Structures are given as structure tokens and as C-alpha cells.
């Protein structure tokens, strides 16, 4: 991507199977990038497997509300709202699939417990 820097997370496993361009600073606390990589489940990439759109939220409540709205409109759960300590101690996220099978995520950073 012209004019964008390569994002390096410092996680050798992640950086080996994926590549991102954009902003990745403060251990991901400031992140806005486009990422490509191998699907986590090692299956061939397809709609919603190897592709995901992620949104940033400013509160855990917003993550919870996103998840509830997605599920109430026909989406499927791919990871209930919660801390993902394997990513970072303040990585609170929810993952869903929309009715067409696309994977979506919403992430809040900056808190380690419910405010």
C-alpha cells in the first residue's frame, strides 16, 4: 500500500503468517491498518475465513452492544465479548459472522477491567 508503513506486532507467530500496513503503535493500542494473512484454522481462505473487518470501539459497553445487535439480526457468534489476554491485557473484543458469512470484529483497547 503506497505511503503506508508495514505493521510489525513483535509477535513472531503473528508476524510470520500475516502482514499489515498502516498504523500499529504502542503495542497495538493505536492501530488502523489493513491486514492479510493465513486463516487461523489453516483452512483455505474464503468468505469470512482469512478475511475480517474490525471496528474500534471506545468502551466495553459498545463491544457488548455490537455483539447483541449482530446476534439479534441473524449473525452468529464467533467469540463472545471478553478480554483476549493472548493478544494484550487490554484487548476486549467480540467476533461475529453476518448472515452472509462475513467475519466482523469490534475491539476496545485501554481498559483491563470494566470501567
Image (cartoon, rainbow, N blue to C red):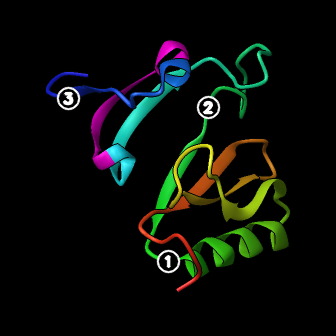
Residue 115, horizontal then vertical, whole percent: 52, 86
Question: How packed is label 3: few (under 14 Cα within 10 Å), some, or many (20 or more)?
Answer: few
CB atoms at circles 1 and 3 under 8 Å apart? Answer: no
Front residue of this view, candidates 107 and 25: 25
Numbered mark located on residue 4 in the image: 3
* Mark toward the start of the polypeptide (1 vs 2): 2
Numbered mark located on residue 59 in the image: 1
Question: How packed is label 2: few (under 14 Cα within 10 Å), some, or many (20 or more)?
Answer: some
CA distance separating discs 3 and 2: 20 Å
- Image quadrant holding the N terminus, namely top left
- SS category of the residue bearing label 3: loop
- 7 left or right, relative to 19: left
Front residue of this view, candidates 75 and 89: 89
* Image quadrant in which you'd find residue 56: bottom left
Q: Residue at x 45, y 63 (%)?
A: 109
Q: Residue at x 35, y 44 (%)?
A: 27
Residue 91, horizontal then vertical, whole percent: 54, 57
- SS category of the residue bearing label 1: loop
| Span of residues in magenta | 15-26
Residue 26, horizontal then vertical, whole percent: 28, 48
- Relative vertical location of residue 94 with respect to residue 104 in this rendering, above or below: below
- 83 left or right, relative to 68: left
Q: Is residue 99 within the magenta segment?
A: no
Q: Residue at x 83, y 56 (%)?
A: 77
Numbered mark located on residue 51 in the image: 2
- Relative vertical location of residue 55 with respect to residue 4 in this rendering, above or below: below
- Relative vertical location of residue 48 with respect to residue 88 in this rendering, above or below: above
Q: Please, which residue is most extreme toward the bottom here?
A: 115
Amino acid at each position: 500500500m503506497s505511503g503506508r508503513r508495514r505493521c510489525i506486532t513483535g509477535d513472531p507467530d503473528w508476524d510470520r503468517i500475516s502482514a499489515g500496513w498502516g498504523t500499529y503503535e504502542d503495542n497495538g493500542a493505536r492501530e488502523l491498518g489493513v491486514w492479510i494473512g493465513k486463516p487461523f484454522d489453516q483452512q483455505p481462505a474464503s468468505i469470512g475465513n482469512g478475511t475480517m473487518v474490525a471496528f474500534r470501539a471506545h468502551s466495553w459497553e459498545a463491544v457488548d452492544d455490537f455483539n447483541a445487535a449482530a446476534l439479534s439480526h441473524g449473525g452468529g457468534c464467533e467469540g463472545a465479548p471478553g478480554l483476549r489476554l493472548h493478544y494484550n491485557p487490554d484487548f476486549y473484543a467480540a467476533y461475529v459472522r453476518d448472515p452472509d458469512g462475513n467475519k466482523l470484529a469490534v475491539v476496545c483497547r485501554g481498559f483491563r477491567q470494566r470501567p
